[in-house]
């Protein structure tokens, strides 16, 4: 009968090498004095509430509902421009002044309609009283009422044309009282915002509705993010967007339905959180990182703490017997760190450095001698 003896260390290596189910009893035995020799450093898990999904370039844009073109309501010559690019303006502020002969025509038509209305109104009040006294017939009253309604409509129409042209209620009131015509047409800001572009110069003649300024309200901004189409399944509405080298953040509000044929990306739109709008500029290009909230416990560890084997990720948890080889799921990466989840409490002490040496011992490629 032949007999042979196997060294204890070899028994450990053979048993570990043949252990394929990665059960919780899978222990790597390393003596305390050999931790430093193998370069093993211990650390704690860092709990996180969200994890990065991917990084992508983005462009800061103005929502179309927050951008306005200020145009000339009547044809004329620009006499003065009162706002420059970058100026903040308030609603109703005068941006430009035009010399407009067409404005004179509108004022004349308004005064004529107003005078007619006053005459017809006097007749209307007289006939109303006569009707009550039974002096006039119903037919005459109907004719008078019809003329009065027509005069009211005409005067209101002419007044609205002047309002569209840019005259304020105060200016219309002065016109009605003093009958003093003016060629000066004031172009006013329709909203409070910032002048983004000047589209005309002083001294030039412009036609009706010719653009003079572009103004935008910058209190709300969007990010247009180019997402690789193969990664779209990882992105969802509500995901948070962080901006590189900035505290600004946004939230995904739209996922595009078409792919850009030139670069095979899909547009994702994110609305910038209002408190951060002032730190961004329309047209600015920047790098973003999309993160998601974790619906289960997740932890941040150094990449060096993870060992890969057969397409799976493992970490080494310190125990009294050595290190427990524990499978984990890598849900995200950021720089030199990974976000993991698994059967973890968050109180474990793990090997944050030296995972290569532990993996070698675990798979039987080395020993603790």
Image: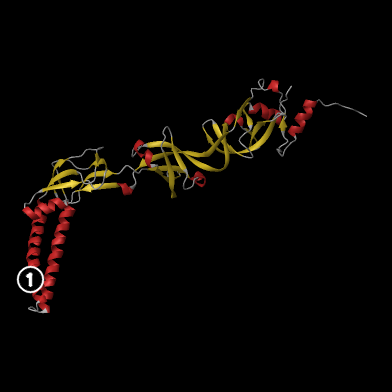
| Frontmost residue, 263 versus 219 | 219
Image quadrant occupied by the N terminus: top right
Image quadrant occupied by the C terminus: top right
Place of residue 17 in the rendered image (x, y in percent of width and height, measured from the top left): 74, 33
Residue 354 higher or lower than 126, as above or below? above
From this viewpoint, which residue is outermost toward the right? 1
Place of residue 144 in the rendered image (x, y in percent of width and height, measured from the top left): 10, 72
| Colouring scheme applied when the structure was drawn | secondary structure
From this viewpoint, which residue is outermost toward the front? 133
Would you call the spot at circle 1 few (<14 residues within 10 Å), some (14-19), or many (20 or more)? few
Residue 31 higher or lower than 192, as above or below? above
Residue 97 seen in render: yes
Q: Quadrant of residue 35?
A: top right
User: What residue appears at the point 20 percent right and 46 percent down from the top-left corner?
Assistant: 188
Mark 1 element type: helix
Q: Is residue 223 left or right of residue 143?
A: right
User: What residue appears at the point 11 percent right and 70 percent down from the top-left corner?
Assistant: 147
Q: Quadrant of residue 223?
A: top left
Q: Is residue 116 left or right of residue 343?
A: left
Provide the residue designation for mark 1: 126
Place of residue 21 in the rendered image (x, y in percent of width and height, measured from the top left): 72, 39
| Frontmost residue, 226 versus 94 | 94
User: What residue appears at the point 9 percent right and 59 percent down from the top-left corner?
Assistant: 109
Q: Is residue 266 left or right of residue 102?
A: right
Place of residue 233 in the rendered image (x, y in percent of width and height, measured from the top left): 51, 47
Residue 260 seen in render: no
- Count numbered badges in the picture: 1
Residue 196 higher or lower than 178, as above or below? above
User: What residue appears at the point 52 percent right and 45 percent down from the top-left corner?
Assistant: 234
């Amino acid at each position: 009968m032949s007999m042979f003896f196997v060294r204890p260390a070899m028994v450990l290596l053979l048993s570990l090498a043949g252990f394929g189910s990665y059960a919780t009893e899978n222990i790597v035995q390393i003596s305390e004095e050999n931790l430093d020799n193998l370069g093993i450093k211990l650390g704690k898990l860092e709990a996180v509430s969200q994890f990065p999904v991917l990084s992508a370039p983005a462009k800061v844009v103005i929502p179309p509902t927050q951008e306005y073109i200020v145009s000339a309501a009547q044809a004329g010559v620009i006499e003065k421009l009162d706002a420059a690019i970058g100026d903040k303006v308030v609603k109703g502020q005068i941006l430009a002044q035009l010399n407009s002969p067409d404005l004179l025509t509108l004022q004349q038509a308004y005064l004529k309609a107003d005078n007619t209305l006053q005459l017809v109104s006097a007749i209307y009040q007289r006939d109303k009283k006569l009707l009550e006294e039974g002096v006039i017939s119903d037919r005459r009253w109907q004719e008078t009422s019809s003329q009065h309604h027509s005069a009211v409509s005409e005067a209101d129409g002419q007044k609205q044309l002047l309002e569209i042209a840019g005259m304020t209620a105060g200016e219309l009131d002065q016109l009605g009282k003093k009958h003093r015509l003016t060629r000066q047409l004031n172009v006013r800001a329709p909203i409070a915002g910032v002048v983004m572009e000047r589209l005309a110069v002083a001294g030039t003649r412009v036609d009706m509705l010719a653009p003079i300024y572009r103004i935008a309200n910058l209190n709300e901004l969007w990010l247009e993010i180019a997402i690789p189409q193969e990664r779209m399944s990882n992105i969802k509405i509500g995901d948070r967007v962080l901006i590189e080298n900035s505290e600004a953040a946004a939230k995904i509000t739209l996922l595009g339905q078409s792919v850009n044929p030139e670069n095979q990306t899909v547009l994702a739109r994110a609305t910038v959180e209002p408190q951060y709008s002032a730190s961004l500029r329309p047209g600015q290009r920047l790098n973003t990182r999309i993160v998601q909230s974790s619906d289960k416990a997740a932890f941040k560890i150094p990449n060096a703490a993870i060992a890969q084997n057969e397409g799976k990720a493992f970490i080494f948890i310190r125990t009294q017997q050595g290190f427990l080889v524990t499978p984990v799921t890598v849900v995200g990466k950021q720089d030199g760190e990974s976000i993991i989840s698994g059967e973890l409490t968050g109180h474990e002490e793990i090997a944050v450095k030296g995972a290569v040496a532990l993996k070698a011992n675990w798979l039987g490629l080395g020993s603790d001698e």
